[in-house]
Amino acid sequence: MADRESVFSDQRVIDLLNDRFVALTGDDWYWRRQQDAIGEFHRQVTDQGPRGGGSGTRQGRYVFTADGRLLGFNNNRSPERLLAMLNQTLEEWQALPAEQRSPRDGAALVGSSAELELEPRFDRRLPEGVTVLRCWTRALEWDSAAQQWEACASAAESGGGRPAGAMAARDHLWLQAEELAALAEQFAALTDGETADLPERLGHRLARFHLVDNTRGEPPMWNSGDIRDWTWQWQRINADTARLTGSFDLATNDGSRSYRGHLDGELAWQPAAASGNGAARQLAALELRALGLHEGQGSYTPGARPGATPLAVVLELVPDPQPADRVPPQASRDLHGYWQAGINP
């Protein structure tokens, strides 16, 4: 997270990458484990760098040719050092023979992502029929003059004293087709004004894996036992819309982390006439907001503000997922545990 703030927000880095490089990104946690073409190529490249040859992390920034020749490596938060590495690799690239600046005979040519044969246990392409919710997390502060919550001030506005994690963090929540169908069926059974509890398993997935402070990096997820109190309901407004409300109390046994607050939101279905059978109705819109006080940090999220401080999580429906919306949820590394959040510890 800090890298993206300090390095990839630098306009010089952005321009150089756009103009002179073919940029790609991926999750080293998956790639270094995958026993398939992507994993093999990843290891081929990273074995040439300072983090190769072992089973631990290989994360970093690599510049390489289409046939897997490593030209440069960098893994720090200095834009100047990254720019120096990128420019050095361009010089090395220009010095290569022409035949080495193109894929060699036998180099893999990758088509669409749907054509890739990935090791099934690490395949996190968006499953057929899964609905995507975009999740934004933001640290807040109280504006006493406006009497409302505001995003933490920028570095310029705060005189350079912006806390770590002041930018928004992004993740995705996945909703299975059968879960959506069950929601539609439950909604159809309600009368206008009636209130009902939403499914526990979906609620626990939201609580454990998405009501987390990921504004400074990869956060620890909540265990089932950390859910001290959880309520979330919907109230049918009319044939196509509902209001969502709830409250949550999440805390570890040792008291080192907690998040307590309230939920509210709105949901709308496509009109029944357009969807046909009620159980097959599709979402037209969904927005859910969580606002509460978060305290504590994890091994990979140091630098939290002291004490219990305001944190907001907003989820919104993605009607037509684009490539960036297909990034799997952070917690889906254990995909079975992600789907079964209300059962597994």
Image (spheres, helix red, strand yellow):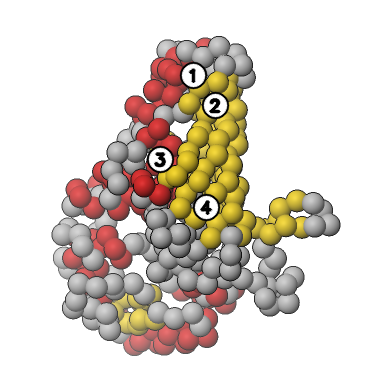
Tell me which label, 1 or 3, sits earlier in the chain: 1
Circle 3: element type? helix
Q: Which residue is mark 1?
A: 187
Q: Position of residue 90 (x, y in %)?
A: 41, 83
Q: Which residue is mark 4?
A: 259
Spatial CA span between label 1 and label 4: 29 Å
Tell me which label, 2 or 1, sits earlier in the chain: 1
User: Which of the two discs, 1 and 4, sits closer to the camera?
Assistant: 4
Q: Nearer the viewer, residue 31 or 225?
A: 225
The answer to whether residue 101 is above or below residue 338 is below
Q: Which residue is mark 2?
A: 234
Spatial CA span between label 3 and label 4: 14 Å
Q: Tell me the kind of residue under disc 1.
A: Phe
Q: Residue at x 58, y 33 (%)?
A: 245
> Marks 2 and 4: CB-CB under 8 Å?
no
Q: Give the image quarter of residue 85.
A: bottom left
> Marks 1 and 3: CB-CB under 8 Å?
no
Circle 1: element type? helix
The crowding category of the residue bearing disc 1, from other C-alpha atoms within 10 Å (few below 14, some 14 to 19, many at least 20), is many
Q: Tell me the kind of residue under disc 3.
A: His
